[in-house]
Structures are given as C-alpha cells and as structure tokens.
Amino acid sequence: MNIVKNYNNLQPEQKKRVEVYCKIAFNGLKSNIDEWNSNRDCKDHVRAITHSFYNTVHSLSIPSGLVSENAVKKKNEEPEWALTKDHCYSPQFVGRMIMDNADLYFSNYELYRQLFLTACTTIIITPEENRALSLLTSNRNNEFVIKAHTDVKYKKQNIQLLRKAVGPKWYTKPMDVVDNYIETPVELLEYETQFLVEDETSYGTTE
C-alpha cells in the first residue's frame, strides 16, 4: 500500500487538516511521556493516552482506494448506505507503539509523521467485517493481545478486496480484485509480535 501516494491524492485543504492533526497528536503524546513511563501498568493511564491519539486519527481518513466485495454488494443493495471506513492499522495500537518507543519517535518528527499517515489509512468495509476484525484484538485489565498480525488480518477474516472505482455510482462499475494482504511497516509487525497469541508464520510475507 503506497501511503505517500494515498496522501498525495488528498485535496490541499485535506492535507492541511491532516498536518495540523498530526502535529497536535504529536504534542499530546509527547506531553504525556512522564505519565506513561510512571504508570505503564495502569490500564486507565494507557487507555486515556492512547485513546486520545485514536480520536485524533479516527477523525481523519486517507483513502487506500480499496473496498471489500461485501461493501460493494451492500452499496448496490442500499445506495444510501453510509460507508464504513476501517482504519486498517489500528490507530490506538499505533499510539501505544509510539509511546513505548518514545525516544525514537519524539526525536524524529518525520518518522513519527509517516507512522501517523499510515494510521490514517482507511479501507471501505461492512459493519459486520469491521466487527470481525475487532475480534482479533482484546484488552482486558491492560492485558493486550492480538490474534493476527496487521498484514494478514484481512486474510484471516476472509475479507476480499477490490480496487475501488471512481466517479458517480462507483459501486455499479467493474472493479479489479486485489490481494487482501495489507502491506505493513516492518517496525509495526515487529512490535506486534510481543502481543501475539497465535503462531503467525506468514508474518512479513506477501503470500
């Protein structure tokens, strides 16, 4: 997935909004580093800090240009259906990763920015598919676990993807099938490994 290309496809005002939110989110996380380090085992601190980052990212969307087959079917059946946009890189988890690697990301804004843009990436899916994906993560009493790496979670839930058509009534137009492997930054995959509860031998592959 070409994160830079997706970002460059945005309109100037959309880019400005992303950059403003990116900076504000950066300042918010950085201001809480002492709280994070002192209370890393407190679920309320962890959730409050990462949820703030999630809220900022979730209010943005950098379209990937991908849509699930089921979402196209639903849109054809219900043209008025409001699209469900999945932030496929799990923004709240990305916020956790940034805080756990603060020395790296707070000393290199561009590195942080690239990760922020990645977290803003969305894929159009159905509410049912969104629910299925959410079941691949669990956070109880600050015990966070994942059941599949980001790159293979669409494969695991058998969500088939298409290259979204453009223009009016795009959902009625022919679309090409694309691989449902989600290209993912290797640093995110490596960070996820410590929370994995299943053996994902396909980690890092493009099967």
Image (cartoon, rainbow, N blue to C red):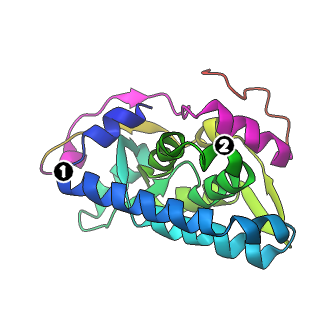
Q: Which structural element holds mark 1? A: helix
Instruction: Give, as a three-letter code, the residue at label 1.
Output: Pro
- Asked whether residue 7 is drawn in magenta, I would say no
- Asked whether residue 170 is drawn in magenta, I would say yes
Q: Which structural element holds mark 2? A: helix
**Label 1 neighbourhood size at 10 Å, few (<14), some (14-19), many (20+)?**
few
Q: Which residue is drawn at 47% across and 46% down?
A: 113
Horizontal and vertical percent position of residue 174:
24, 34
Residue at the bottom extreme of this rendering: 44
Q: Which residue is drawn at 61% across and 46% down?
A: 105
- Give the vertical position of 158 relative to 82 (above or below): above
Residue with the mark numbered 2: 104
Foreground of the two, 12 or 6: 12
8 left or right, relative to 192: left
Residue 201, located in which quarter of the rendered image? top right
Q: Which is more N-terminal, label 1 or label 2?
A: 1
Residue 193, located in which quarter of the rendered image? top right
- Asked if one can make out residue 160 in the rendered structure from this viewpoint, the answer is yes
19 left or right, relative to 111: left
Instruction: Give, as a three-letter code, the residue at label 2.
Output: Leu
Horizontal and vertical percent position of residue 181:
56, 31
Q: Distance between the residues labelled 2 and 1?
A: 29 Å
- Give the vertical position of 204 relative to 192 (above or below): above
Foreground of the two, 3 or 136: 3
Residue with the mark numbered 1: 12
Residue interval drawn in magenta: 168-197
Q: In which quarter of the image is the N terminus?
A: top left
117 left or right, relative to 103: left
Q: Which residue is drawn at 71% across and 54% down?
A: 136
Horizontal and vertical percent position of residue 205:
66, 22
